[in-house]
Image (spheres, grey):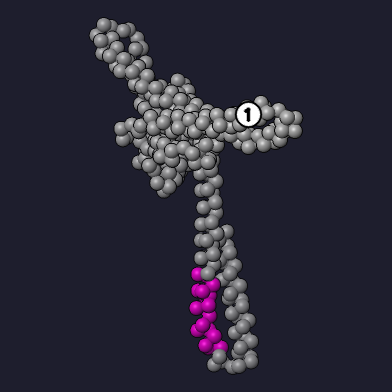
Amino acid sequence: MAKGFLYALASAGCATLVVVGFVLYVTFGPGLLFHALLLAPIVLCGLVVAHDVLTHRAVGAKERLRLARERDRVRRTVDLVTDPALTDVERLAVIDCFIPGLGRGPARSPYRDRFVVVDELSPSSRALLERARTAVMAVYTSQVMRRRLLDDLANGTLLPRQLWEIAMLLRVQTHLQEEQDKAREGRLTPELLTVLEPQQEALRRSVASVTARVESLERYAERVQEADAALRAMDALGNNHKYQALLAHTDDAEGLRELEIQGDTLQETLARSVRDAIEAGHTLQPGPPA
């Protein structure tokens, strides 16, 4: 299509050159016609270059749009846990390896050890990861988080790192369990069991350790939710003046005192709940570097 357009442009240019040349010859004589003929190739070259530039720009824009759509498709369809230390460029490279014909493929990506494909985990590992994700999301969507009442270090740094380390360990555990299952196919001799049983025990202890880390995240999320509940109670406490006015009109002094006591108690409860949540966040210590 581009060649056809180029041929048409050249034909139109030649036809225009002939017509203009004839008009110049009739009107101004052969001198001006000679100069026009010298300038004509330059003009034609300029038109060709302009056409090529516009064509390349159009193609580039289409390619960028197609790439953006493919990246959005990968984000929607491929469940990944990535190393939080990845740069934006590296994250795009990870996404690109899932686009057919663009990258090297996930297995050959230079960042293969910097992301985990959730679908490649065993069912039990996926269940543990989902629990960890649910706990982290509960923290991120909490009101105390939005109002910046929690420890920014725990929420902004440790939580993503915890998810990443848990996902990495689950991937290793899945791979090792597959090896164990394969080794146990067929007849099990005492010699084989002597080798496999300590390995299985090590794997079991690793799974127990990861489960404990997930439970720590869940306890942190519970403390944050308790702080959220106390915060909602404090927000509701702001309406106490309406009820105090109602009781004042009904001469209920005892009810007024109860509302005042309730307000003091709720303030203490909120402060204690936030402190408990922050302390729970401090227990989320980062693991060894990957």
The x, y position of residue 102, in whole percent, is 45, 45
Q: Classify residue 152 by image quadrant.
A: top left
Q: Classify residue 262 by image quadrant.
A: top right
Residue 59 belongs to the span the image colors magenta: no
Q: Is residue 14 left or right of residue 117?
A: right
Image: 167 above or below 17: above
Give the residue number, with chain letter if any, for mark 1.
257
- Range shown magenta: 33-49
Of all residues, the one furthest to the right in this rendering is 250
Q: Is residue 26 left or right of residue 93?
A: right
Q: Nearer the viewer, residue 14 or 264?
A: 264
The x, y position of residue 99, in whole percent, is 47, 41
Three-letter code, disc 1: Arg
Q: Nearer the viewer, residue 26 or 138?
A: 138
Q: Classify residue 10 by image quadrant.
A: bottom right
Q: Nearer the viewer, residue 103 or 265?
A: 265
- Majority SS type along the magenta span: helix
Q: Residue at x 75, y 33 (%)?
A: 249
Q: Is residue 108 left or right of residue 99?
A: left
Q: How many marks?
A: 1
Task: Give the quarter of the figure containing the N terminus.
Answer: bottom right
